[in-house]
Amino acid sequence: MEFLPLVAIALLFWLLIVRPASKRQKEVQKLQAGLAVGNKVVLTSGIFAVITELGDDRVHVRVADGVVLEVARGAIAAVEAPDQPGPEQPGPDTHEEL
């Protein structure tokens, strides 16, 4: 009975800290394992880019026409969904009414 509070604290620590961190780590590993050339990604620095080449631990990404960066695979924070439309921008013949 003396060890019951310690066991309860250890269980609570595992439920609140270790388990969620483990889930996040598995999700990140799954995301980084599923990368493919042509994916639109967001880097941890907030830069939006397109993957042009994949390596074991490095990825080449295009951030602008003629600008390719080599980044660590771990720097990729998210992959944009392929069917996710970009922000709509009015064309030159489109006029917004005030």
Image (cartoon, rainbow, N blue to C red):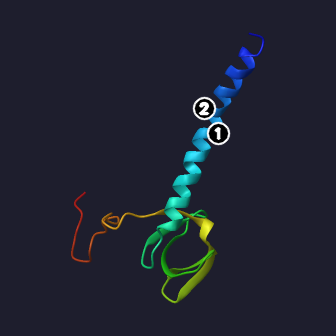
SS for dot 2: helix
For the N terminus, the quadrant is top right
Residue type of the residue flagged with mark 2:
Leu
- Mark 1 highlights which residue? 18
- Residue 41 in the image: above or below residue 28: below
Examine the image and state in which quarter residue 82 appears: bottom left
Q: Residue at the location (52% across, 54% down)?
A: 27
Residue type of the residue flagged with mark 1:
Val
> Badge 1 local density, few (<14 within 10 Å), some, or many (20+)?
few
- Mark 2 highlights which residue? 15
Residue 26 image position (x, y, % from top left): 55, 53
Examine the image and state in which quarter residue 56 appears: bottom right
Q: Are marks 1 and 2 in contact (CB under 8 Å)?
A: yes
Residue 5 image position (x, y, % from top left): 72, 16
For the C terminus, the quadrant is bottom left
Q: In this rendered view, identify the residue nearer to me: 83 or 87.
A: 83
SS for dot 1: helix
Residue that lies at the very extreme toward the top in this rendered image: 1
